Image (cartoon, helix red, strand yellow):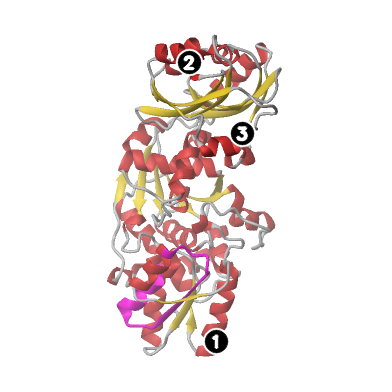
Amino acid sequence: MSNLATVQAEQTDTDLMQQYLREILLSPVYQAAVETPLDAMTKLSQRLGHNVLLKREDKQPVYSFKLRGAFHKLHKVKQHSPDASVVCASAGNHAQGVALSASKLGIKATIVMPITTPEIKVAAVRALGGNVVLHGTAFDEANSYAINLASTEGALYIPPFDDCDVIAGQGTVAKELLSQHNQLNAVFIPVGGGGLVAGMAVYIKAIQPNVKVIGVEPEDAACLKAALAAGEPVTLERVGLFADGVAVKRIGTENFNLAKRFCDEVVTVSSDEICAAIKDIFDDLRAVAEPAGALALAGLKKYSQQLKNSTLSKPQQFAAVLSGANLNFDTLRYVSERCELGEKKEAVFAVTIPEEKGSFRRFCQTLGGRAITEFNYRYASDHKAHIFVGIKLRHGQQELNTVKELLSNAGYDYQDLSDDELAKLHVRHMVGGMPPRQLQEQVYQFNFPEYPGALMNFLNTLGEHCNITLFHYRNHGAATGDVLAGFEAASHDDIAAYLDKLGYQYQQVSNNRSYQTFLTTG
């Protein structure tokens, strides 16, 4: 069905290049796909000192590069077996690529999706003409079912990445990229199953072998890195799911054989670094990438930082592939929470402070005027309190080291939680709870103006006169921030004068049912 022979170990690099080059150059993908723009990221380029370009595969009709490989494969199917039907398994971009390609070519397509697939993705596949079958709770179950279904119905199974024709279709991204900019120093490509990096790498090395090809993987789903270390594809025990578009346990065999020959390097990045890249894309282009879509840019940024420590001083021409934008909207909440950590613009700490009036204010003074981005506290004992605090950083790791030194010199017992996944994902939202004894407590919601000194004004006005028993604050970048605070007082009248002096809008919420249920002992 394919003009491409399966890659064999004894084939020369030249043979492979010639085979794939012909397929890529003659690919019919533009019957369904579009040539996507190469956009300059001006702000990020200025910050990094290198020219950064983004290949916008989110501009495809299905918002992902996957359409290219799917159409190239199905076009071959149509040529050789006009009446054939196809089956695939996918919870995301591959499903939409197959559905649209099949619709364009008049091929019956059944897409098996896990029952846990968000309804928005199921609806999208159906809208493109795909026959959706929901089966299994995870991709592996759906995939096994799809393979069996294809066998029993005499249909052709369409793999998501481990296929010569799929790889060639994805390689058309590189054809466009080099025609749009022929002076690149390096191209950064996201790696999941390896279809995109394999197809792009073989084309780039055939046309401009001097251009570096750098694959980028999440730290918790680095199947290519593991395969390179082992000398063959290996199955990861588990993978992280944040960048679900590249959450693949085992790289494709065909893809690995190409990647090991034509990919120069692999960079791995954390979830926080991916979140920071999503924000960079939004800041520069007002585009919203899915986590897997921003993966390559996160790798570019990390690689750029590594260059600072080398002798290379000349500005480089870098391109990264924004591979997709099929984002679950709820994911944005997580992204906004983590992007500052990914940029090293924020650090989070657990700190023990004395349980006494003025303690929080003295802690803030120790930080030398640095902005507090988050503060979680609940009265725990008469002697000491454990707080969860976020601190704004302007100079990355260097400033983080300075903050640690300040805390140590002031005698605070602290833990840096900036790289603690459990703390950032769960613990920060669970700090507090009920106090160990019943308190005479008044609780208020405040509207804090978001400007330097607003928090210190609060502490200077109230902190020296009232014992703060509860405090939750998170800076979200809006004009005002919402703060929940409790004070040890028998009645509102005991602290009303201080509250009025503060000058911030507030309302008493001491009778709120959720507060009384979860945060009081009475």
Q: Residues within 10 Å of mark 3 (few under 14, many from 20)?
A: some
Picture layout, residue 380 above or below residue 463: below
Q: What residue is shown with label 2? A: 493
Separation (CA) of disc 2 from disc 3: 29 Å
Look at the numbered disc 3 and give the secondary structure of its residue.
Answer: loop
Magenta residues, start to end = 96-119
Q: Give left or right: position of 174 versus 431.
A: left
Labelled pair 2, 3 in contact (Cβ < 8 Å): no
Q: Give left or right: position of 357 versus 182.
A: right
3 vs 1, front mark: 3
Q: Position of residue 440 (x, y in %)?
A: 60, 22
Q: What residue is shown with label 1? A: 151
Q: Residues within 10 Å of mark 1 (few under 14, many from 20)?
A: few
Q: Position of residue 70 (x, y in %)?
A: 41, 71
Picture layout, residue 294 above or below residue 137: above
Q: Position of residue 21 (x, y in %)?
A: 40, 67
Q: Position of residue 127 (x, y in %)?
A: 33, 71
| 507 or 146, nearer to the observer | 507
Labelled pair 1, 2 in contact (Cβ < 8 Å): no
Separation (CA) of disc 3 from disc 1: 53 Å
Quadrant location of the C terminus? top right
Number of numbered discs visible in the structure rendering: 3
Q: Give left or right: position of 339 versus 317.
A: right
- State which quadrant residue 51 falls in: top left
Quadrant location of the N terminus? bottom left
1 vs 2, front mark: 2
**Residue 431, numbered label:** 3
Tell me the amino acid under the disc marked 1.
Ser
The residue located at (34%, 34%) in the rendering is 43
The residue located at (62%, 32%) in the rendering is 417
2 vs 3, front mark: 2
